[in-house]
Image: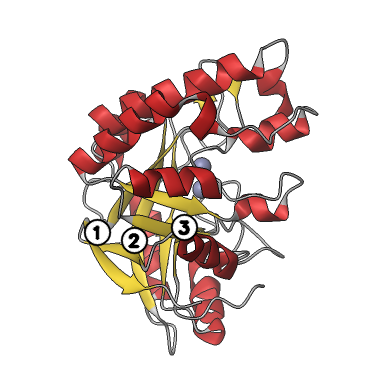
Amino acid sequence: MTAARRIIDMHVHTDDSPDADIPAGDIAARAAAGGLLGVGFVAHVDFHPADCCTGAFSAETYSRSLERAGGTPGSPLLLAGIEVGEPHLFIEKAMEKSEGMRLDFVTGGLHWIGERLLLDASGFAGADPLDLVEEYLRVCVEIAGSSPIDILAHLGVWRRGLARAGGLVDMDETRLWPGLLRRLFEAMADRGIALEVNTAGLRRPESVTYPTAPVLRFYRECGGRIVTIGSDTHSEPHVFYGLSRGAEILASVGFTEAFGFRDRRPFPYPIVV
Ligand SMILES: [Zn+2]
Ligand SMILES: [Zn+2]
């Protein structure tokens, strides 16, 4: 685990998601021991017919799990969130599914373009990667303009699938698609949607955050100020991986504060590197 003191990790899955296996209480204990400022829990709420998490979410079970975690001695701030896959298609269903539970934030994650899972090599089979990435950005613009989410997760996570497919992932989106990115960031600013710096890519062959530093710099140039840091923790041995590096990258492109969300409203805390 990378030292991650004074950071709120806003993207932590628990065993309430089928692809993750650590109980929320254990995460809270690890966060207390590691000196984190807080943990934003998420559970996958998916409806894409081919997604491994579709149909698994139960608001009742998840709420109970987070309540139990709240009793952890020395626990830092614990925030309750969900990660909605393809929110432009499924946000209404996801909110229905979550009815009755306390929700501090809703994260939107784009994993699928049609039948292509961009997190996996198979998603790029027989496709021109540039076409697919451009389409990914177009859908992100659609999400930002239409979906009532608080945080846009892992912008650029397609690098994971493309790297697995043996493709080159060092392209600079700010040079290839500046107009699309500007539309995306302006839509996010209009609707108060935060941009997440997801540090899971740091432990993968592509070895970058999603999004990369140039994209984060461009977000700031476009007026973007609300950023969250998230490790996308699913299981050992990568609990809270890369948070400090994520904070350093944010600081290097001019950010002095990152955000948590409570009751669906952002609150800042200083980035200390
Ligand atoms: Zn995701
Ligand atoms: Zn996630």
Tell me if I can see residue 43 in this picture: no
Q: Residue furthest right?
A: 166
Residue 159 quadrant: top right
| Secondary structure under the numbered disc 1 in the rendered image | loop
**Which amino acid does the dot numbered 2 rest on?**
Ala
- Residue 47: % across, % down: 43, 28
Residue depicted at 46% across the width and 34% down the height: 55
Q: Earlier in the sequence, mark 2 or mark 3?
A: 2
| Secondary structure under the numbered disc 3 in the rendered image | loop
Label 1 CA crowd tier, 10 Å (few <14, some 14–19, many 20+): some
**Which amino acid does the dot numbered 3 rest on?**
Val
Return the residue at label 3.
253
Tell me if I can see residue 83 in this picture: yes
Q: Is mark 2 within 8 Å of ligand 2?
A: no
Q: Earlier in the sequence, mark 1 or mark 3?
A: 1
Residue depicted at 71% across the width and 22% down the height: 122
Structural distance between the alpha carbons of marks 1 and 2: 7 Å
- Residue 205: % across, % down: 77, 46
Structural distance between the alpha carbons of marks 2 and 3: 29 Å
Structural distance between the alpha carbons of marks 1 and 3: 34 Å
Residue 145 quadrant: top left
Quick one: 239 or 51, which is closer to the camera? 239
| Secondary structure under the numbered disc 2 in the rendered image | strand
**Which amino acid does the dot numbered 1 rest on?**
Arg
Return the residue at label 2.
80
Return the residue at label 1.
102
Q: Which dot marks residue 114?
A: none
Quick one: 178 or 142, which is closer to the camera? 178
Residue depicted at 58% across the width and 34% down the height: 172
Quick one: 233 or 185, which is closer to the camera? 185
Asked if disc 1 and disc 2 are in contact, CB closer than 8 Å, the reply is yes
